[in-house]
Image (cartoon, rainbow, N blue to C red):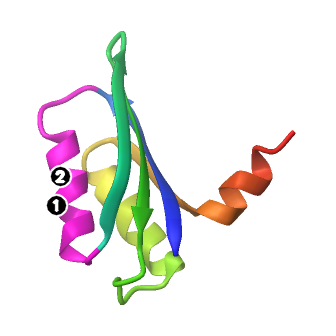
Amino acid sequence: MKAIVTVIGKDQVGITAAVCSLLAQHSINILDISQTILQEYFTMVMLVDTTACQLSIGELSDLLDQAGKERALSIRIQREDIFNAMHRI
């Protein structure tokens, strides 16, 4: 299954490394990634493939939420089909 991961928060060293490492630990492949800094805010959007991951989307969501709280970031994951349905005009 493909999913969208978003990361938003105050810029700090190691955000990309921390998030990508966490995803790799759970066999989640990053298919596409975009990141930028808007003034002092870091933003990142990733398209990921969770096919090889043993966790459910709910468990992944909880794991990313906890990791985000530890770094004062908002880290969210959403299934690609739901993301597309929400952003259709």
Residues rendered magenta in the picture: 11-27
In the image shown, does 34 or 62 lie closer to the viewer?
A: 34
The quarter of the picture where residue 83 lies is bottom right
Q: Residue furthest right?
A: 89
**Under tag 2, what secondary structure?**
helix
Residue type for callout 1: Ser
Residue 24 falls inside the magenta stretch: yes
Q: Quadrant of the C terminus?
A: top right
Furthest residue to the front? 31
User: In 3D space, how far apart are the residues under numbered discs 2 and 1 (Cα atoms)?
Assistant: 5 Å
Magenta: main secondary structure equals helix
Give above or below for 32 relative to 56.
Answer: above
Residue 38 placement, left or right of 18: right
Residue 60 in the image: above or below residue 72: below
Disc 1 secondary structure class = helix
Are discs 2 and 1 less than 8 Å apart at CB? yes
Query: x, y (%) of residue 39?
Result: 36, 9
Residue 18, numbered circle? 2
Q: Residue visible at 34% across and 31% down?
A: 35
Q: Identify the residue under disc 1.
A: 21
On screen, 39 above or below 5?
above
Residue type at mark 2?
Answer: Ala
| Extreme-bottom residue of the structure | 54
Residue placed most toward the observer, 14 or 45: 45
Residue drawn at x 36%, y 56% as measured from the top left: 31
Residue 48 in the magenta stretch? The answer is no
- Is 85 in front, or is 39? 85
Instruction: Where is residue 16? Give x, y as percent.
Output: 21, 43
